[in-house]
Amino acid sequence: MLIRFRKIIISVFVFSILPSSFLLAQSGSSALFSTGLLLVAAIIIIMAIYLVSENLLGIEAHQIGKGGEPSGTGSFFGKIKGVKVPKYVNGHFTKLTKGHNILLKGAPTDDVVEVKATTFAIQPKNFNGMSPIPKVVVNEGDEVLAGQELFFDKKRPEIKYMSPVSGEVMSIKRGEKRAITEVVILADKVQKYREIPAIDLDKVSRDNLVQFLLDCGGWTMIRQRPYDIIAEHNVVPDNIFISTFDTAPLAPNPAVLIKGQENHFQTGVKLLSKLTNGRVHIGLDANGESAPPSVFVNVADAEKHWFAGPHPSGNVGVQIHHTKPISSKDQVWILGIQEVLTLGKLINDRKYDVSRIVAVGGQVLSHPRHVRTKLGAKLNDILDGQGIKEDDRIISGDVLSGKAKLQDGFLNYFDDQISVIPEGKEFELFGWLLPLKMRPSISRTFPGFLFKEMQYSVNTNTHGEGRAFVMTGQYEDMLPMNIYPQHLMKAILTKDFEKMEGLGILELSEEDVALCEFACTSKQPLQHILRSGLEIMQEQG
């Protein structure tokens, strides 16, 4: 392919020089002007040929799992654009150019404060694909240990969901059609843990390791793609992916999450390496001036991949796409840093310890910071003393893909951040005609694009209402994957199964299209649309 393009380039040079030579033989400034135009045209054609060739090579490399985006860092155009590989990067590097960073006021400091939460809950709705009425094996008033079974999914009874703390089962709350919404536990002042048997990772068989995780509750830390559900216990994954950084607004600092727990992370990765026929892949952050924590860079039993670029470069789905894309026959597993730590503690400490460091951020908070608590903690306990008002929106997760909560709600199972922003109740007259107020936007109508490091004050106002679903091309600029999200969304709405699969629905989860939803001119609920499509595909098998 390269030889073919070189021949084309040489031909362009020849055909541009010949008329130039002929014109130079003539006299007058008009000949020189014509010659200049021909030379400019020749340069443009050559540049276009280079661009097309490199994009084709990039796509081909991506299809075999050996490249990043077209026109990557090693390309001719990548060098022109000044793309540099950080000095600390050693290994596979992918530079992502699509996406958008949203910098908000109220970023959490690196301080970690111990929070004495008293009430915790496990919420079945946190688990995609679970039966709305799981089988609860405890009753109100029962005493439970940390790591003791609370309920199991009737569809997959082997997978057990455990209590995050020891204490008394306060209530089993139900919603519409008697679906269970929360199993609430009042925690003991001194925690008591269910005893977990010791295992030797060097000698244990895979089958015994799977059974161990099912019995002690560690299995619920592992999710699978496609569908973003708790992993199937009877399937061997092709690969396992761990993203060690988060580029979402107000995200936690990975160095804070891992500090003092490096040995648990290494043990967790070693455990995961026993569960796959492929590799454990670690996504590393190459956006900073300095290298990420050394435990991520030097962890054994894993293959490292460096990523740089705006949000959503930290999303594990994006990293999978640029490492080992998911096909219709593939199944991969994903975990976050703190899920890996929990698995490591099962082996090292023989305890079901679901301690979590949670980033608490937002402009309305008096003390944005990191807090140490446990999975499923009550938000009131975490946000105590932060000056929360009635008209503030509490979000479990980030502002793009998190879920709105009441103050007496609970932290969602896989979330490691809480965001608090004001409700957008005010009406902004002619806001789009008079773009005077600075706000995060992908549109250059607002002057904020001139200040890349500016932090914004935001609220929940969508600055518009739902409207016709028009083709804008905005989604493609927000999603650094070889996917056409707008076409995919329309295929989901029309329930065209073949197009949905062909357009890449199996590679996506809600967090991957959250930025597209932020940018959407049509104000479409893309995350809700995507989840409905994934549920349809899962039902179809």
Image: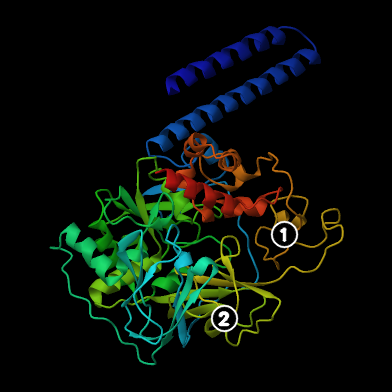
Q: Is residue 228 left or right of residue 82?
A: left
Q: Is residue 12 left or right of residue 283?
A: right
User: Which dot, 2 or 1, sits closer to the camera?
Assistant: 2
Sequence-first tag of 2 and 1: 2
Quick check: 56 above or below 357?
Answer: above
Point out residue 451 in the picture as x, y percentages from the top left corner: 70, 58
* Residue at (61% x, 22% y) in the render: 45
The residue tagged 2 is 408
Q: Which of the image's four quarters has the C terminus?
A: top left
Check disc 2 and give the amino acid type: Asp
Point out residue 407 in the picture as x, y percentages from the top left corner: 59, 79
The residue tagged with tag 2: helix, strand or loop?
A: loop
User: Dividing the picture into quarters, in which one does residue 465 lie?
Assistant: bottom right
Q: Is residue 88 visible?
A: no
The residue tagged 1 is 462
* Residue at (39% x, 75% y) in the render: 259
**Pointer 2 local density, CA inside 10 Å: few below 14, some 14–19, many at least 20:** few
**Pointer 1 local density, CA inside 10 Å: few below 14, some 14–19, many at least 20:** few
Check disc 1 and give the amino acid type: Thr
- Identify the residue at the far bottom of this view: 189
Decide which of 3, 60 is in the foreground and name it: 60
Q: Which of the image's four quarters has the N terminus?
A: top left
User: Dividing the picture into quarters, in which one does residue 464 lie?
Assistant: bottom right
Q: Is residue 211 left or right of residue 337?
A: left
Q: Is residue 187 left or right of residue 367?
A: left
Point out residue 260 in the picture as x, y percentages from the top left corner: 35, 77
* Residue at (68% x, 23% y) in the render: 40
